[in-house]
């Protein structure tokens, strides 16, 4: 073999180089395939595919057939002829298991960087376990546009769920502006939409049929005001309608076990404020006012604010949990199953470890953290 051929064969996967070298020694036209269609010579030399197809293709090369005909006989899409030698083994393996996937992803591969292209193919096949081919191809294309580095499989798994469900049940899963997943989205947009959607589902699934047993602080009276727990879905809705405020937006924070909400009433029982209690920033064992709003989200009076501070200070004990203190009663589990059953039906019960049939209490907090970290990382890259 010539020096140039040795260098070219050296770019193929290590286990195939000797076979390709021996095959190319048969005729110079096989050597030319190493440059014009590396995937074709790899398939011929390594005995990939049916023997009758390989024999027909090998003869066609010797007879001077067009490259498109050779590829067609081998069952290889013409678009794959451009693939560099370093990735032909992974490409053929992907083609054997899902030709649609391989065809879709080819246009997104950074062919100028074979190592990155190979990693993307391997990563893409992993993502395909949890997602549609359309999403997996889109995801890898986005990663290529961001320099070839992603935030690990968990981000892909979470986004894949949103992409699948939003396409399947668009009326339920689209965001407020009616945008489910589409291949025209950018990563930044999908992260934002998916995170907002998962947070809403956390509120609906966790709180709709649940009474929160641990409100962290005890309801009671202080300085002429009553502090009543908002511990059920119906009480959240009643408070939001009566106060014309953003209580419903804060239900997600409750579902993620970040805060608790209380209705503040005057001595006659009239609603004067809604207060959101959460851990103090510097000491998570201590409660603090995270937000307090009057009717229409207006600021509260100093009197109401001081009464709220006194109510917190007067608590004999409080234990803000490190983990989730909201239970998963049978009705909540049934709702969890109804939401994700279409996904499980399509990919299998164990397809996505982030969506087990028996969820752990912190599943939504973990998903939110994954997406929040991905958003922060994307901002830093830009």
Image (cartoon, rainbow, N blue to C red):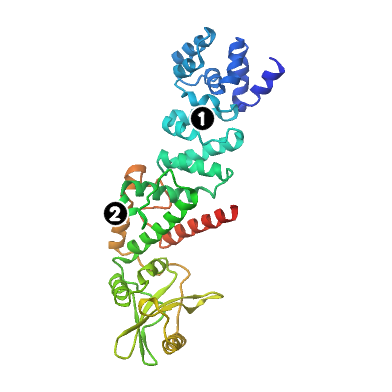
Residue 91: assigned label: 1
User: Residue 355: x and y, percent?
Assistant: 39, 52
Horizontal relation, residue 137 to residue 177: left or right: right
Residue at the spot x=35%, y=67% of the render? Answer: 327
User: In what element is the residue under mark 1?
Assistant: helix
- The spot of residue 51 in percent (x, y) is 46, 15
Q: Looking at the image, is 6 positioned above or below residue 277? A: above
Pointer 1 or 2: first along the chain: 1
- Please count the marks in the image: 2
Marks 1 and 2 sit apart, C-alpha to C-alpha, by 37 Å
In the image, taking residue 198 as reference, residue 79 lies left or right, namely right
Q: Residues within 10 Å of mark 2 (few under 14, many from 20)?
A: few
Q: Position of residue 323 (x, y in %)?
A: 45, 67
Q: Where on the picture, by quarter, is residue 82?
A: top right
Residue 2 or 17: which is nearer the viewer? 2
Position in image of residue 326 (x %, y %): 37, 68
Closer to us: 312 or 266: 266
Residue 274 is tagged as: none
294 shown above or below 146: below
Q: Is residue 237 above or below residue 8?
A: below
Q: Secondary structure at mark 2?
A: helix
Name the image quarter holding the N terminus. top right
The residue at 46%/29% (across/down) is 95
């Amino acid at each position: 073999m010539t020096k140039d051929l040795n260098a070219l064969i050296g770019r193929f996967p290590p286990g195939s180089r000797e076979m390709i070298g021996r095959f190319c020694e048969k005729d110079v036209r096989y050597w030319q395939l190493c440059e014009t269609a590396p995937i074709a010579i790899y398939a011929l030399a390594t005995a990939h595919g049916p023997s009758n197809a390989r024999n027909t293709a090998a003869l066609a090369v010797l007879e001077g057939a067009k490259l498109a005909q050779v590829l067609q006989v081998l069952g290889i899409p013409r678009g794959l002829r451009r693939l560099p030698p370093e990735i032909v083994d992974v490409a053929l393996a992907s083609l054997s298991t899902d030709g649609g996937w391989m065809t879709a992803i080819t246009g997104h591969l950074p062919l100028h960087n074979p190592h990155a292209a190979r990693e993307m193919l391997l990563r893409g096949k992993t993502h395909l376990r949890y997602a549609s081919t359309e999403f997996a191809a889109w995801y890898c294309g986005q990663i290529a546009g961001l320099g070839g580095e992603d935030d690990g499989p968990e981000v892909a798994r979470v986004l894949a769920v949103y992409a699948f469900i939003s396409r399947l049940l668009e009326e339920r899963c689209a965001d407020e502006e009616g945008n489910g997943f589409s291949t025209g989205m950018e990563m930044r947009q999908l992260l934002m939409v998916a995170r907002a959607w998962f947070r809403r589902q956390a509120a609906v699934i966790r709180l709709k049929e649940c009474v929160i047993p641990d409100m962290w602080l005890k309801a009671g009276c202080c300085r002429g005001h009553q502090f009543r727990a908002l511990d059920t879905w119906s009480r959240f809705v009643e408070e939001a309608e009566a106060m014309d405020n953003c209580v419903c937006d804060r239900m997600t924070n409750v579902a993620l076990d970040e805060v608790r909400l209380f209705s503040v009433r005057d001595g006659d029982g009239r609603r004067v404020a809604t207060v959101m209690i959460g851990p103090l920033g510097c000491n998570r064992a201590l409660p603090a006012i995270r937000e307090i709003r009057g009717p229409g989200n207006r600021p509260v009076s100093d009197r109401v604010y001081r009464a709220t501070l006194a109510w917190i200070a007067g608590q004999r004990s409080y234990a803000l949990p490190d983990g989730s203190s909201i239970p998963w009663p049978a009705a909540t589990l049934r709702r969890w199953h109804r939401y994700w059953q279409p996904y499980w039906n399509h990919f299998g019960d164990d397809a996505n470890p982030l969506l087990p049939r028996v969820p752990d209490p912190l599943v939504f907090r973990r998903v939110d953290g994954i997406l929040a970290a991905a958003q922060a990382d994307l901002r830093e890259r830009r």
